[in-house]
Image (tube, helix red, strand yellow):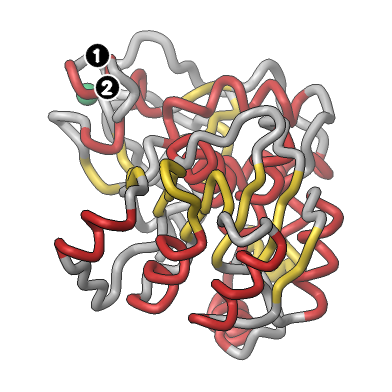
Amino acid sequence: MGHEYCGIVEEVGRAVTSIKPGQFVIGSFFASDNTCPNCQVGYQSSCQQAEFVGGAQAPLLRVPLADGTLVAIPDVPADDMVPSLLALSDVMGTGWFAADAADVKPGSTVAVVGDGAVGLLGVLSAKQMGAKRIIAMSRHESRQKLAREFGATNIVTERGDEGVARIKDLTNGIGADSVLECVGTHESMMQAIHSTRRGGYVGYVGVPHGVELKGEELFYAHVHLHGGPAPVRRFLPALIDLVWKGKINPGKVFDLTLPLDQVAAGYRAMDERRAIKTLLCP
Ligand SMILES: [Zn+2]
């Protein structure tokens, strides 16, 4: 909790060279040097110096490895752009990684398992990458509406084996080229694998809770699996550019804004599914 942040730099440490006070910056939930071998191939969330960044639900935050971790935006943004910039810190970057890991290409048929902020932004990412059909799996009306706004062409309300059957119905019995798994349960992971066509890709970004994969089942599924903690830092410059130019508006996932001292009410609203995502203002 409290690992998503953006804001104005107040002070920098002695070793910091590129980040300056007064800049508006965004960082990911993993601090990274952006120079080690893992960073250089785009896996900054596995940086050799990676450090988890938490405690961001506060008026001030200390960000380690500032030069590697933070990306400054061109200027201080207008207030109405801040939600979209904040979304880049995790949910948008993670949704983008899910689509990237699932090899979404122009013309692809994509299915998205999970209708939380990450799943919805996975829909937006697939749309940006040129997917032709995007099937969002959701049973909540407000989330279905936002999924459609972000580019979903079909909605599937069923889950598990029934959900898989619906995806097969929609794809001539073949399955989707790319499936984004944005939940992390055993059921959602199996739903993703079974919804993928032979030779297709699953991008999984849901933190696993009790997922167990059987070797034999994987062997015969014939799908590519790639995922993990999203290397959000890799995507920040390109995503900042898309937001800055008004091409994407991922901040729409914030449907509740509260002052920082009402943080508990924000979590309660998300827990009770009255809110997709809460934005806290210090
Ligand atoms: Zn590194």
In front of the other: 177 or 68:
177
Q: Quadrant of ligand 1?
A: top left
In front of the other: 275 or 212:
212
Say which residue appears at 82% left-offset and 34% top-offset: 78
Q: Name the residue under label 1.
A: 35
> In which image quadrant can residue 175 be found?
bottom right
Question: Does the rendering let one see residue 190?
Answer: yes
Tag nearer the camera, 2 or 1: 2
Q: Name the residue under label 2.
A: 39
Query: Would you place residue 72 above or below residue 92 in this image?
Result: above
- Disc 1 is placed on an element classified as loop
Does ligand 1 reach within 8 Å of label 1's beta carbon? yes
In front of the other: 43 or 241:
43
Say which residue appears at 81% left-offset and 75% top-offset: 142
- Disc 2 is placed on an element classified as helix
CA separation, marks 2 and 1? 6 Å
Task: Name the residue type under label 2.
Answer: Cys
Query: Where does the image place residue 229, in percent across and percent down from the top left?
Result: 33, 48
Circles 2 and 1, Cβ within 8 Å, touching? The answer is yes
Task: Name the residue type under label 1.
Answer: Thr
> In which image quadrant can residue 105 be found?
top right
Does ligand 1 reach within 8 Å of label 2's beta carbon? yes
Query: Where does the image place residue 87, in percent across and percent down from the top left?
Result: 62, 47
Quadrant occupied by the C terminus: bottom right
Say which residue appears at 60% left-offset and 80% top-offset: 270
Q: In this view, does 197 lie to the left or right of 136?
A: left
Query: Would you place residue 19 above or below residue 228 in this image?
Result: above
Query: Where does the image place residue 61, in percent across and percent down from the top left?
Result: 41, 46
Q: Is residue 221 left or right of residue 167?
A: left
Say which residue appears at 61% left-offset and 65% top-offset: 168
Query: Where does the image place residue 31, in percent across and percent down from the top left?
Result: 30, 36
